[in-house]
Amino acid sequence: TLPREYHESHRSVMVHEALQYLLTRDDGVYVDCTLGEGGHTKAIIEATSARSTVIGLDVDAEVLALAERKLRDIQGNVRLFNVSYLDFDVVLGSLGINRVDGFLLDLGVSTYQLKARGRGFSYEVDEPLDMRMNLSNPVKAVDIVNKYSERELAKVIFEYGDEKRFSRRIARSIVKRRPIQTTFELVEAIRAALPPEERHKRKRHFATRTFQALRIEVNKELEVIRNTLEKIPGYLNPGGRVVVITFHSLEDRTVKHAFREKKGIELKILTKKPVVPSEEEVRENPRARSAKLRAAERI
Ligand code: SAM
């Protein structure tokens, strides 16, 4: 049984495009670095007529338990591990595998993390501020919000939230309202820092950027992506692919730069510009609207 109430299911993004770039052989071994609810993994197994193997990783033990249940029918084709994808090499080592045919990373949060009770990722429900993907990580969002200096907070919000004009005001408002314990208390601090016309003109909820910034800081997301992409080419068979789906510009930039550093040395870039989802997909799944996919091939 799952530890929390959860009645939805994650809709995988850009499945068709991801498989088109990722799959080079039916009997390949692929690493799904961000297993989530296993949507992409399942699609890989189906598209390869159950001849491939997927090594699925997720740092979130609760999400992994959910995936285990959802992938029961194809358990012979998958090996699942509750680890950070940063440690994919340790997993491959433990399986005696030196190289694989592809890596898939579908970044960001899964629907479970946003919607299951009490994970503290969402500005839409009032819960203790948490935002950890790895539940044994000692640092929660609540610690950052209450312990960082005003300057440090402003920097996190500026850099990771792309909150260029108002990061300082938001940081000041947070510091003034400490201690902040819940998502709604944080939303209130952000609301108070933004002029009403600014709040209203934004296409997305006014708390989105600050919540994104804290999530990135709690989970050290950009660092983890950078260090993982640095290692991946050394574990790909020649002709093997790495495919990354991102959901905001900071992630996309990180991927673009990581690929570029290996360009002509270990990698051939397959997507000059990032691939975006079809209009139809965006219409059916609004979460897809900011998705961008980049792919590269091991030389
Ligand atoms: N592709 C999945 C599907 O089709 O169901 C959804 C993936 S979801 C967008 C991203 C997942 O990556 C989350 O479940 C999250 O826990 C996981 N994740 C985030 N950081 C991670 C890390 N460092 N290592 C492993 N998994 C991570």
Image (cartoon, rainbow, N blue to C red):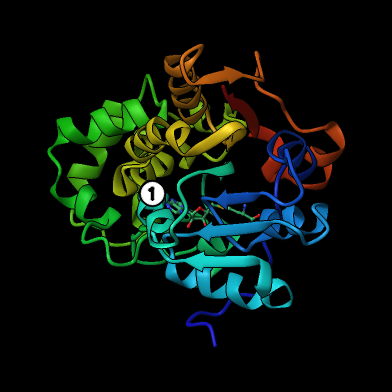
Give the quarter of the figure containing the N terminus: bottom right
Q: Position of residue 139 (x, y in %)?
A: 22, 57
Task: Note whether ligand 1 is within 8 Å of mark 1.
Answer: no
Corner quadrant of residue 74 = bottom right
Q: Residue at x 43, y 64 (%)?
A: 60
Q: Amino acid at mark 1?
A: Asp
Camera sees residue 131: no
Asked which quadrant contains residue 90, the reply is bottom left
Residue 192, position in %: x, y? 36, 40
Residue drawn at x 82%, y 52% as measured from the top left: 47
Residue situated furthest bottom in the rendering: 1
Screen quadrant of the C terminus = top right
Residue on which disc 1 sits: 89
For disc 1, the neighbor class at 10 Å (few under 14, some 14 to 19, many from 20) is: some
Q: Looking at this view, is 118 or 165 the one in front?
A: 118
Q: Is residue 212 above or below residue 165?
A: below
Is residue 275 visible in the rendered structure shown here? yes
Which residue is rendered at x = 50% and y = 44% of the image? 99
Question: 31 or 299: which is nearer to us?
Answer: 299
Instruction: Decide: is 14 above or below 269.
Output: below
Residue at x-position 18% and y-position 51%: 146
Residue 41, given in percent of the width and then of the height, sits at 67, 57
Find numbered disc 1 in the image and state the secondary structure of the residue it sits on: helix
Percent coordinates x, y for residue 158 in the rendering: 33, 26
